[in-house]
Amino acid sequence: MPPARGRFGAFLRRAGQGTRTADRHPRRAVPGRMDRGHERLLTRIDDLAKALVAELTPWSDRGMAVFGHSLGAMLGFEVARRLQAAGRPPVALFVSGRVAPTRHRREFGERPDGRTLIEQMRKLGGTDPRVFDHEELLELALPVIRADYEAVESYPYRPGPPLSCPVIALNGQDDPKVPHGDVDAWAEQTTGAFERFTMPGGHFYLMERQAEVTGVIADRLARLTRTQPV
């Protein structure tokens, strides 16, 4: 996996500081990724969401907040929907670097080749530039990169009951993939509160704005945990 993806966990740990969080779900990747790389890659958001809900169900009665960036925001939304349908809605959904599901558009007219995907990664940033100098490393990462893009491209938004939890959207001011109006459309997906925070930067703004991002998450969780522990 690109190094930038491995860095998300570190600042999310900081986001929990200052809340009354007693337990944290152990971070595990979805099948085919990271420590589950020996398993079959999943290339559909629905399948990824089902796999994560199965992992989270034993923890969901304790109160849970969901955070996702880019593809992870789409996945987090579908996980939140499934948790709510099971009677265990999350206390909050944080979506970063992703348009609302009703504004989702395919990026590629046909299945892109490996070079196209790598060039897209280079343009968006968030990956150590030195990675692109190592062909063997890129070849090893390509199956996961391709699976991620396939999951995004094939995502079929299906209308359903809105979430009851607050939805907090974050995005980079100069993100070419995420127009601000399409971020505001997340408000349609909840009967709870909606907030948007725009920060300087592009698609991977959160790598340079860790303090601001974790500050938003920690502040909102602290407010929520006054009434329901996370």
Image (spheres, grey):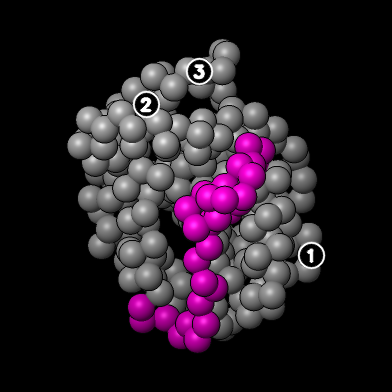
Q: CA distance from mark 1 to mark 3?
A: 37 Å
**Residue of label 3:** 112
Q: Amino acid at mark 3?
A: Pro
Question: Is 126 placed above or below 135 here?
Answer: below
Q: Residues within 10 Å of mark 1 (few under 14, many from 20)?
A: few
Which residue is located at x 61 percent, y 50 percent? 39
Q: Secondary structure at mark 1?
A: loop
Of labels 1 and 3, earlier in sequence is 1
- Is residue 212 toward the left or the right of residue 143 in the image? left
Q: Is residue 188 magenta?
A: no
Of labels 3 and 2, earlier in sequence is 3
Q: Which residues are magenta?
A: 17-45
Give residue 96's position: percent from left, percent from top.
44, 48
Give residue 108's position: percent from left, percent from top.
52, 17
Q: Is residue 42 magenta?
A: yes
**Residue of label 2:** 118
- Observer able to see residue 93: yes
Q: Secondary structure at mark 2?
A: helix
**Residue of label 1:** 86
State the residue in front, 194 or 24. Answer: 24
Give residue 93's position: percent from left, percent from top.
55, 59
Q: Quadrant of the C terminus?
A: bottom right
Q: Amino acid at mark 2?
A: Ile
Which residue is located at x 75 percent, y 40 percent? 159
